Amino acid sequence: MNTSLAEVLSAVLLLAVLACAVIRPWGRSEALFAVPAAGLVVATGAISLDHAGEEAARLGPVIGFLAAVLVMAQLCADEGLFQACGAWMARTAAGRPRRLLAQVFVTASLITAVLSLDATVVLLTPVVFATATRLGARPKPHVYACTHLSNSASLLLPVSNLTNLLAFAASGLSFTRFAALMALPWLVAIGVEYVVIRRFFAADLDAGAAAALPSGPSEVPVFALVTVAGTLAGFVVASVLGIDPAWAAAAGAVLLAGRALARGRTTPMAIVRAAALPFCAFVLALGIVVRAVVDNGLADGLGHLVPDGTGLLALLGIAALAAVLANVINNLPAVLVLLPLTAPSGPGAVLAMLLGVNIGPNLTYAGSLATLLWRRIVRAHDTDVELGEFTRLGALTVPAALLLAVPALWASLHVLGA
């Protein structure tokens, strides 16, 4: 196939795959459309078999890591971790919506960082709905906090977001170095979100009438908490020893699964479903389609737009470009496209790109798959999400968070070194 045809075909297939991921025709899995598209770009020669194999080999460990973390998150839910979080939020909020918002921020930020943004969107959001309703508070500020933090608060650890896992593998950083460099930008981004959301939803926060408080504290799932803490420690040890952190994630998932199976709290099929194998197949197929687009000219076109170096202005430019691209083609393909272009400039450029693709999606629905999933969950709870309101809030948080988080990253790079 000639270059022009390959370029057009790969671009059209990428847009089709992304459109199907957003719309999900007939409620079908994203993989149903992405896997044939990946097969087509290989069969037509839009990407060589060698390059497709390289991409699959690069993404394989990342996808295994993702599956293990998703299983851990679901098993933590089965252990009652998220219900315990809801009870804690309700109890400490004492019927005050503004305090509840602060508790949601703390809980969602930690869950996103440790158990990934999917846990916040899928497992915490329904709990936040129930908690706000039980307290007589309007749920909108609190559930909007869940979706914004699922993106902005996913900066801290490699495990927080699939985009982080991809970047971590290419950055050359250790687990602890990644976390140390991203800690300050993470805190800054969360702080911006809190200030803006609190002001944006001031009327809703003032309107809620306190309901009766829950009768007593719920049981704390100690085993789940200890396992999660041990898994995090395992990530650090694995990074120091040069072992793939996916093994630590797998060990944590096996421990939780063994206990849940022994106690009859789950089934083997439920564990397989929790691993989200169709979504993992979608990620792999998407990676191959994006590689075809990159190989056929996109890299050359974007390469002229990516700033060189890791000075403050260069980092701001990289983050801004990444945020724009995330809202045009979704943040996951944006990472796959930008990683080969930013990695040669070093870890600082890769991390600046992450700020853009993780904070930027709060501007539009299409920015991340997590936001699209959150929208479906909100509608399932009979709450409407207005496009104008979502965009107005994003227009306030995204530029402010990027303008403050990028200098925080620049400062961390200078103080700690890359």
Image (cartoon, rainbow, N blue to C red):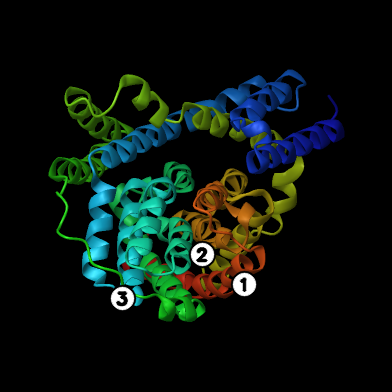
Residue 387 or residue 42, whichever sits in front: 387
Quarter occupied by residue 189 = bottom left
**Considering only vertical position in the picture, is 155 above or below 270?**
below
At numbered mark 2, what does the secondary structure look like: helix, strand or loop?
loop
What residue is shown with label 2?
310
Q: Are marks 1 and 2 in contact (CB under 8 Å)?
A: no
Residue 262: horizontal and vertical position, in percent? 17, 23
Residue 347: horizontal and vertical position, in percent? 45, 54
Residue at coordinates 63% horizontally, 52% vertically from top-left? 366
What residue is shown with label 1?
392
State which mark lies toward you, 2 or 3: 3
Residue 345 or residue 98, whichever sits in front: 98
State which mark lies toward you, 3 or 1: 3
Q: Residues within 10 Å of mark 3 (few under 14, many from 20)?
A: many
Quarter occupied by residue 25 = top right
Distance (Cα) linking label 2 and label 3: 44 Å
Q: Quarter of the image containing the N terminus?
A: top right
Q: In screen coordinates, is 85 left or right of 295? A: left
**Considering only vertical position in the picture, is 378 above or below 135?**
above
What residue is shown with label 3?
96
Residue type for callout 3 = Arg
